[in-house]
Image: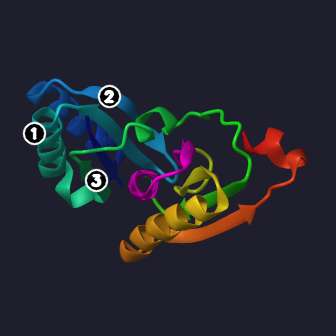
Amino acid sequence: MSLGALEFSSIAMGIKALDEMVKIAPIKIIEARTICPGKYLIVFRGDVASVEYSYNKGFETGKNFIVDNLFLPMIHQDVIPAIGNIIQTENWEALGIIETLSVVSSIEAADIAVKVGGVKITEIRLAIGFGGKSYVKIMGPLDAVQAAMNAGVAKAKANGQLCMETLIPQPHIEIKPFFM
């Protein structure tokens, strides 16, 4: 499974790109909507060729309005279900949060983090009411969460998109209803 994501600084251009993208190849739209502050987000999946064709078409259509972009030909299977959703887990040993300045960078950080292994991506929150920021929640054993956080944070930093990160070993059970 492949994943593509495009963030546009123009809502109108984002909608135009979306139309062009679905016309060129059979893709499944995961999210396509306005996000803060006045941007347009498209997240989509499909086979490698379809995602690549649609990604290239969307990028070409809105190239002067692209805020951030991502094409992942080999996305980890745990990332897509966590996009905009909360995935329940019983492992409450450690939790990590990577907060980024764009949705795309959170998705990319999540993919890299989960590929390190031994962790669960429990949520990728997509810039609704966060001033355009996004975050990914990671849970698992402390050593695995530390390794996953290191990988995800390094990628977000390399892209200049890291806002903040935190690792909480042995979180108190009182915060679980507010985290899950």
Along the polypeptide, which appears first: circle 1 or circle 3? 1
In-image side of 37 versus 52 (left or right): right
User: Where does the image place residue 168, in percent across and percent down from the top left?
Assistant: 73, 63
User: Where does the image place residue 85, in percent across and percent down from the top left?
Assistant: 56, 33
Q: Which residues are magenta?
A: 104-127
Point 56% across, 59% down: residue: 144
Question: Judging from the image, what secondary structure is the residue with disc 3 in?
Answer: strand
Point 27% across, 57% down: residue: 66
In-image side of 47 versus 142 (left or right): left
Rendered image: mark on residue 70: 3
Question: Judging from the image, what secondary structure is the residue with disc 1 in?
Answer: helix
Along the polypeptide, which appears first: circle 2 or circle 1? 2
In the foreground, 28 or 97: 97
Q: Dot 1: within a 10 Å radius of its alpha carbon, few (fewer than 14), some, or many (20 or more) residues?
A: some
The residue to which callout 2 is attached is: 29
Give how far apart the Cα atoms at labels 3 and 2 are.
14 Å
Q: Quadrant of the N terminus?
A: top left
The residue to which callout 1 is attached is: 53
Point 44% across, 75% down: residue: 157
Q: Can residue 165 be seen at all in this image of the molecule?
A: yes
